[in-house]
Image: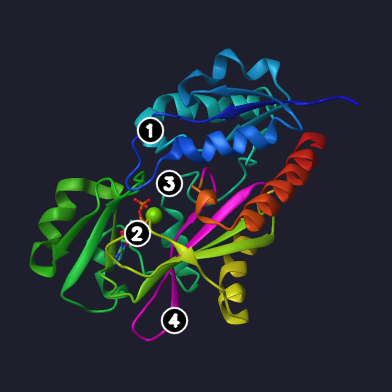
Amino acid sequence: MIIHTILFVTDLYYPAKGRNYYEEDLFLTSKLRETFHLVICHPEDIEAFEDHTDLIVFRNAGPVANFKVKYEAFRKRVIAKHLNTYNSLDGKADMNGKEYLIQLTDAQLPVIPTIDTIDHLDELPHGHMYIIKPKDGADSVGLKFVEKDKLVEEVKAHSKDTLIQPLIHFEYEVSFYFIDKQFQYALYAPDKDKRWELKEYTPTDKDLHFAKRFIEWNNIHWGIQRIDACRNEQGELLLVELEDLNPYLSLLELSEEKRNNFVEVMKDSLQKALKG
Ligand SMILES: Nc1ncnc2c1ncn2[C@@H]1O[C@H](COP(=O)(O)OP(=O)(O)O)[C@@H](O)[C@H]1O
Ligand SMILES: [Mg+2]
């Protein structure tokens, strides 16, 4: 039997807020190496190894804005050299920045209403407080609370690279994790001030229907996606973001059974990706 090789891309030393990325990747690589020949690689060093591997698995690399030029060059080489990647890089969401939130708003999907120009302010629900965030942001970098009076000034200072949203007074945030189009598990943050202290969440049919709409919309060939949502004061879920490049998975927060099950499903999905 042929054992395939995997280039596992992660920044083991990335200082993520409230999380130790490397612990998740130490776990995941220890499991994947049971089935594949695996090499760990820093996200800025992919080029040196990409021609000598069967599949490039992009995991906890941190925000790509930190190595924007190299990331864009990598995306170009994936197309030019037909490199096989996991996730497949055909997503429409976070892998291309946050601009898709405007598209989803225009399509009237259940998402935090989002615009990128003050001229469209009428399209947002009227309120006193707004949030602005950079289109290429992640890990809350550049996120700012702004009062209505200050909005014009703030947005001008950032030009069109900034998104504008109403401040949502949500009850809690909840994330739904998918491999390919299959739901795996859900976690929520019961304490609003502790975004990364997550507990298991049992979704209702309605919740799953909500999450699956975005998975269907994105329609990627293969990979792991995380649907982040918040429950607003009216009890409705609104999309916060769709992570389709390298969502942190909080695998070590899961029960052993769920964690191992996730690994098995991921291995099957990687085998599918290897077949192309
Ligand atoms: N419009 C909003 N209203 C209230 N809270 C928000 C809003 N947008 C973001 N947040 C808070 O900020 C966090 C980070 O925002 P997010 O859009 O997920 O960006 P990032 O890519 O940096 O994770 C969210 O998890 C949520 O707690
Ligand atoms: Mg987020």
Task: Residue 241 in the image: state x and y as whole percent.
Answer: 44, 59
Task: Residue 173 in the image: state x and y as whole percent.
Answer: 40, 68
Q: CA distance from mark 4 to mark 2?
A: 19 Å
Q: CA distance from mark 1 to mark 4?
A: 34 Å
Q: Amino acid at mark 4?
A: Glu
Kindly check if marks 2 and 1 are in contact, taking CB atoms under 8 A apart as contact. no
Which stretch did the figure color magenta? 222-246
Question: Which label belongs to residue 236?
Answer: 4
Count numbered badges in the picture. Answer: 4
Q: According to the image, label 3 marks what residue?
A: 97
Q: Main secondary structure of the magenta part?
A: strand
> Label 2: how many residues lie within 10 Å, few (<14), some (14-19) or many (20+)?
some
Q: According to the image, label 1 marks what residue?
A: 14
Q: Could you tell which of marks 2 and 3 lies nearer the N-terminus? A: 3
Q: Amino acid at mark 1?
A: Tyr
- Give the secondary structure at mark 2: loop
- Which residue is at the front of the view, 276 or 206? 206
Asked whether 234 falls inside the magenta stretch, the response is yes
- Give the secondary structure at mark 1: loop
Extreme right residue here? 1
Q: CA distance from mark 3 to mark 1?
A: 20 Å
Q: According to the image, label 2 marks what residue?
A: 195
Q: Is residue 198 left or right of residue 213?
A: left
In this view, the mark in front (4 or 2): 2
